[in-house]
Image (cartoon, rainbow, N blue to C red):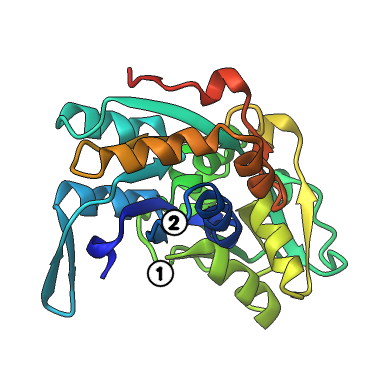
Amino acid sequence: MQQDAELILWLAGNQFFAMDDVVRAFQRQNPGMDVGLITLPPGLLLTAIERNGWTYGGKDYPGRPDIYASVNLGHLGKLKQTGLMKDYAVYMHNEMVLMVAKGNPKGIRGIADLKRADMRTSMPNPVNEGIMQFYGRKVLERHGLWQHIAGGKECFSCQATMSNWFTAVHHRETPDRILAGTSDTGIVWVTEGIEAQRQGKAVDMVRLPPADSLRDEVAYVIGALNGPRKAAADRYLAFLRTPAAQAAYAKYGFVNASPQALTPRPIP
């Protein structure tokens, strides 16, 4: 069981593919430490923390992590308000791209192409997927495309419009829908595009200008919850400041955080 581990991490799901390397690097510096890990959309993780656990199949699974990470500082702010977390750090960055089929057969060049009549999109949902909640939506709104994509709906695993599907877990569904020919494109993190290609999936990425990729804004924030394993959590946060941790993430396309960003500070 996760609660039997010496350190429990609940992290924003879009870093799942890097975590084997990250955890192994941590354990090399902390031999013998047993680590439990869950990677899911950060909104779902936050809800589980607030409810002190999960309910699945009619059964309760109580417990909280020692470390929580999101792509939105407001999530950590909610934990501060309840007395569960005090400090945070930025530990890496990312940027948005459009995933397309290999060779980009539709000739997609940027966000403006999403309004084309022949375009079928697979988009992260606006309910609990941080990439859309905090980043993608405002880019689509700035381009005047939000209603075209959402059709007035706030849902997940749903056909929002005739041409757009809102996912439950976008980094799994969007490449699969593109490969199946049911979608032409969708917003993903560049790291997810790199991972899909590493897995041999026939997809490409359309890079976006900084105003649309938000590469200068997207930040992964992390903090330790107050609890009995706080010392182990602090060791993990210290590890993230090491070259070994930053290199493990960079291998998968994440942008390293600066030493200043990695320095813990009070949650505002």
Tell me the kind of residue under disc 2: Asn
Helix, strand or loop at disc 2?
A: loop
**Which residue was labeled with disc 1?**
157
Q: Mark 2 points at which residue?
A: 125
Of all residues, the one furthest to the front in this rendering is: 31
Amino acid tagged 1: Ser
Q: Nearer the viewer, residue 3 or 249?
A: 3
Q: Does residue 177 appear anywhere in the picture? A: yes
Q: Residue at x 37, y 52 (%)?
A: 9
User: What x and y, as percent, mark residue 40?
Assistant: 40, 59
Q: Do the residues labelled 2 and 1 touch (CB within 8 Å)?
A: yes
User: Residue 96's spot in the image, x, y percent?
Assistant: 65, 45
Residue in the picture at 44% in, 55% down: 151
Q: Which of marks 2 and 1 is nearer the N terminus?
A: 2
Q: Is residue 131 left or right of residue 104?
A: left
Distance between mark 2 and mark 1 Cα atoms: 8 Å
| Side of 231 relative to 188 (left or right) | left
Left or right: 34 as drawn, with respect to 249: left
In this view, the residue in front, 56 or 121, is 56
Q: Residue at x 62, y 30 (%)?
A: 257
Other-residue count near label 1 (Cα within 10 Å), few / some / many at <14 / 14–19 / ≥20 = some
State the residue at coordinates (50%, 29%).
90
